[in-house]
Amino acid sequence: MRRFFLIIMVIFFNTGLLCQVETKMGEEKGFVKFGDVFKQAQNLQFPIFDPNVLTLERPIDPESYIVGPGDILSVNIWTSPPLNFLVQVTVEGTVIIPTVGEVKVAGRTLSDAKKEMMQKIRAKYISGEISVTLVAPRTFYITITGYAPRYEKYKVRSIDRVSNALALAFQPIDTFRIERRILMADSVNFRKIQLRRNGAILNVDLRKYFATGDDKYNPYLLEGDWLILQRRDPNSFVSIYGAVNKPGSYEFVEGDKLRDIIEIAGGTLESADIERIEISRLDEQGKIKEKIYVNFKDILNGSVEDISLERNDRIFVPEKRTLKQDYKVTITGEVKRPGTYPISRNGTMLSQILKEAQLTEYADVANVLVISGGVNNPIAVRIDTLLPLLLLKNFVFPSSDSLYFSYEVDVLKSLKFKSIDAERVISGLEDYELQDGNLIYVPPRYNFVYVFGQVNNPGFVSYEKGRDYRYYISRAGGFSQFARKGDVKVIKRKTYTWSDAEDVEIEPGDYIFVPKKIIREPIYYWNLAKDIILTVGAVASTVATIILISNQLKTK
């Protein structure tokens, strides 16, 4: 509802509704007084008006525009010399044409008024062309009551519609009333606005106007119009969901048809299955009473009648399922042509993408990672810079550490990835079928082993085939003073899993971690001994008490 009101406000400002409200606000800068415009017109033979004054949706239709007091008309008599007059319709509904006389025009369409004036002028000027043109519309007052911010008269123009008047009524006067007026506008029933005109009551339906553009749902205003706004009834609605442009809940009006609500919802999407639209109805207990399936295509071509809706109907427009989707994978890392590649729903193999992307000479083809759903994962797309964080997955983060850092490690640990030996894929020994959203990461080749932790010279050590962890620790300067030598771990580069150093073979790119001995202060051992003594004493006391009670029972 708020979006709908904002649309009206945008139209209001874009069409230059520069009318005055009969308040102090009307005196502020930005409002154009038509009296000033008329003075300008009188001083110019060919008047050039402020374009904001005459901003229109489209040219005025002379067959429907009703002339009234205040309209300014230009009369041109093409004789020698030519005569030009600006005339204004008087409060009595007439125009006074110099040298011609008075002509009654109020209440007539612009087309009829022009014919009457030209006929009167021709009686005076027999020869020469005659033209009559409306150059400035009139202003007048209308009244807005009902569910409105204030019961008040508003100054509008004859080229303004009901929607313009509502935008003016709900325009905030000051910053303190903005929220209140927006909330009120959200609750207005835009499909049941009463327009009282000359004893008749017309219904204004702004939703249908913006859906169809039909003027009858949002008429132009006339003198004396009285608008009565109604509050939206939350128990009177029609909902529409699925493959439409603006799904949601809309006000229900007696006589609504299925086509009306679909138009109000902005029409259907191209993918909509309009041959099986579902209308669901509930009984008074809120249970499903009826489901109606409608072939809307037949309604559009006129072969069947439109379906009449009931209050609280819910409409579902299904969407045709198509397998023509945007299937894609992304490859990054050591390739000559990184980026996103389109694939088929199934049957696209890793070998095809590797061939198109072209591996560089530095690619570690034995450790290619394929991450499921990685294309849409903001962490996965940074895999080349964040993979080292997986080394920390066996550590417990203290509360002082960054929460975001911890979050990234946790997300990386949850990534579903598969390590693939691309050498076997390229040679044709095996292959891997890709899925939509896969991220393929080709890491750079490492011919090193990284040793860190409690060693004297942590860093990279050149890989030597067949060597165990002791060799790499010795090349890193050996164990430091506080090294926990019996608990050395190896982190495998392919899986980032931690293993005891004695149980695995060292491969290029692996990490060797030497943990630190736990060094405790003497007070720790003193407290530990004290706790043990107190515990033993308590146990001894309990045992002695039990023995004493047992002996007393035996003597009895």
Image: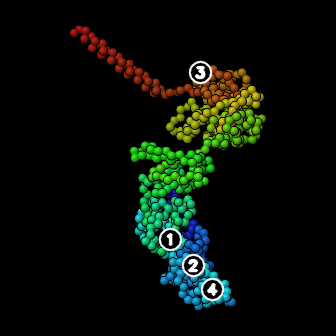
Q: In the image, what residue type sits under mark 3?
A: Gly
Q: In the rendered structure, are the residues bearing label 3 and label 4 in contact, judged by CB atoms less than 8 Å apart? A: no
Q: Earlier in the sequence, mark 4 or mark 1?
A: 4
Q: Nearer the viewer, mark 3 or mark 4?
A: 4
Q: In the rendered structure, are the residues bearing label 2 and label 1 in contact, judged by CB atoms less than 8 Å apart? A: no
Q: Which of marks 2 and 4 is nearer the N terminus?
A: 4
Circle 3 residues within 10 Å: few <14, some 14–19, many ≥20: few
Q: What element carries label 2?
A: helix
Q: In this view, does 280 lie above or below 518?
A: below
Residue at (44, 54) in percent of width and height: 236
Q: Which of marks 3 and 2 is in front?
A: 2
Q: In the image, what residue type sits under mark 2?
A: Asp
Q: Residue 193: image x %, image y %?
A: 46, 63
Q: Residue 383: image x %, image y %?
A: 65, 38
Q: Which of marks 3 and 2 is nearer the N terminus?
A: 2
Q: Is mark 3 on a helix, strand or loop?
A: helix
Residue under label 1, please give it.
221
Residue under label 3, please give it.
486
Q: In the rendered structure, are the residues bearing label 4 and label 1 in contact, judged by CB atoms less than 8 Å apart? A: no
Q: What element carries label 4?
A: strand
Q: In the image, what residue type sits under mark 4?
A: Asn
Q: Residue 87: image x %, image y %?
A: 56, 84
